[in-house]
Amino acid sequence: MNEKMKVYEEKMKKAYDFLCEDLSTIRAGRANPHVLDKIRIDYYGTPTPIQQVANLSVPEARIIQIVPWDKSMMKEIEKAILGSDVGITPTNDGTMIRLVFPELTEERRKQLAKDIKKKGEDAKIAVRNIRRDGNDEFKKLKGSDVSEDEISELEDQLQKLTDKYIKELDAAVEEKSKEIMKV
């Protein structure tokens, strides 16, 4: 694959990676420490990821246990979780914080599945926009030292790349939807 295509493949890969990262933060009724990835703790004036100030573990299917290395951070961690969009009230027993994930209702599962589909559509739009930008770039090459056949070949390669990433995005959305709908 030539240099021109590498640029567009990297952009499409970033769109795919962003979707996967975004989907990993959606809770599916089971405890998943990734739901805390976006939370930052004020650690002596510095916004710090929760994973860098505490030990996260999943002792049971629906419980995340957070044990801070510095006990003075308990209130900060609790405050950050309450202020986040996790939607779970932490339980603090003085030595650790527990997050107990309730079972998802059927209605909530359907809503999450709809949200997942929307995120997938947004990612597909991003990939298609990258394809459009690439095709526009290739059209600008007309009249230069690049032949019509070479431009056509570049457009074909870009379309194949687009199809590949659209298929991967669909698979990621399908997998997460199944995980959400599983009771």
Image: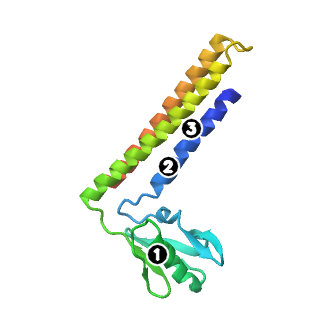
Mark 2 = which residue? 20
Q: CA distance from mark 3 to mark 1?
A: 36 Å
Mark 1 = which residue? 65
* Secondary structure category for the residue under label 1: strand
| Percent of width and height locating residue 143 | 70, 12
**Three-letter code for the amino acid on which mark 1 is drawn:** Gln
Q: CA distance from mark 1 to mark 2?
A: 24 Å
Q: Earlier in the sequence, mark 3 or mark 1?
A: 3
* Secondary structure category for the residue under label 3: helix
Is 128 situated above or below 179? above
Q: CA distance from mark 2 to mark 3?
A: 13 Å
Figure quadrant of the C terminus: bottom left
**Three-letter code for the amino acid on which mark 2 is drawn:** Cys
Is 124 situated above or below 83? above
Q: Is residue 182 visible from the viewing direction of this image? A: no
Residue at the far left in the pictured view:
106
Considering depth in this image, is 174 or 123 the residue closer to the camera? 123
Mark 3 = which residue? 12
Residue at the (44%, 63%) spot, across then down: 32
Using the rendered view, name the quadrant where residue 140 is placed: top right
What label sits on residue 106 in the rendered view? none
